[in-house]
Image (cartoon, rainbow, N blue to C red):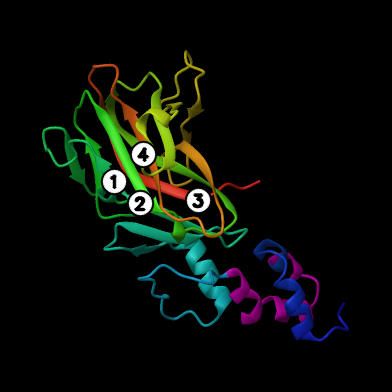
Amino acid sequence: MNNLPEDCIAKILSLTSPRDVCRSSAVSRCFRSAADSDHVWNHFLPSEFPEDFRAPEGLPTKKHLFFSLVHNPLLLHDSQLSFSLERSTGNKCYMMAARALNITWGHDQRYWQWISLPDARFKEVAALKMVWWLDITGKINISLLSDDTLYAAYLVFKWNLDPYGFRQPVEASLVLAGTEHDDVQPSMVSLMHNPGSEQGQRAELRSDDWYEVQLGQFFKRRGDMGEIEMSLKETKRPFEKKGLIVHGIEIRPVLP
């Protein structure tokens, strides 16, 4: 293989994955040079970026741009949406800020408070003071996502010092926007680790010290149009709920 021209090696590497390319750079000096080439990493970058995307300044190569987008999500749409790439595939990932979601009574200060936290990606997060009726919904245009990719949506959240009313599972759903209400089959998810409940998905602690719980999955095919609607609801048991802090909803590829 080392006898092959470098551009030929680069062509072969571009047909693999970012993970394979990084591993191949340890084979030889020739492979390392090919693995760093713009031709290879341009293949892993999206063919289409979001409308208001601007590449960060000071990145000398396509490889630098790729890993910048993996590790440093860019804020778009008036800082209400973040864009990044999944490390092993280069597929697109997005996170919608709490401000971009439809939160019932979210603008009523009796029920929700908008605060800033140092570990948040966005300027503001939504802190629940108290409600009986919890309803959080987000929509994203499916054309923003990578083709032929299985995606999942996650509510990203944490708790204040005194959460209450979330011991029981709540309803989660993910559907094509416009789906009739009667056709939606929600799943049950647990925001808190409750030893007495084994229903549905459970929240998991992330590496950034926020929690996430999966709302659902969908497969994005080439040519798909419309919006995906994701929601978390608890409207059937009229008891007090408080202490939830909503960061946003993240949409990212499901890894094997």
Crowding around mark 1 (Cα neighbors within 10 Å: few <14, some 14 to 19, many 20+) is some
Mark 2 crowd level (few <14, some 14–19, many ≥20, 10 Å Cα): many
Horizontal and vertical percent position of residue 248: 34, 46
Taking 50 as reference, is 70 left or right? right
Membership of 128 in magenta stretch:
no
Mark 1 secondary-structure assignment: loop
Q: Relative to 218, say whether 11 is above or below.
A: below
- Residue occupied by mark 2: 96
Extent of the magenta region: 22-44
Residue 150 placed where, x, y %?
A: 57, 48
Q: Earlier in the sequence, mark 1 or mark 4?
A: 1
Residue 12 in picture, x, y percent from top left: 77, 74
Residue corresponding to mark 1:
101
Label 4 sits on residue:
157
Q: Quadrant of residue 105?
A: top left
> Disc 3 designates what residue?
252
Amino acid carrying label 1: it is Leu
Position of residue 40 measured from the top left corner of the image (x, y, whole percent):
66, 76
Q: CA distance from mark 2 to mark 3?
A: 11 Å
For the residues labelled 1 and 2, the Cα–Cα distance comes to: 7 Å
Image: 129 above or below 19: above
**Which of the two discs, 2 and 3, labels the residue nearer the N terminus?**
2
User: Can you tell which of label 1 and label 4 is closer to the viewer?
Assistant: 1
Tag 4's secondary structure?
A: strand
Q: CA distance from mark 2 to mark 4?
A: 12 Å
Check the picture and name the quadrant holding the N terminus: bottom right
Query: Image point 37% across, 35% down: which residue?
Result: 180
Residue shown at the point (46%, 32%) measured from the top left: 203
Mark nearer the N terminus (1 vs 3):
1
The amino acid sitting under disc 2 is: Met
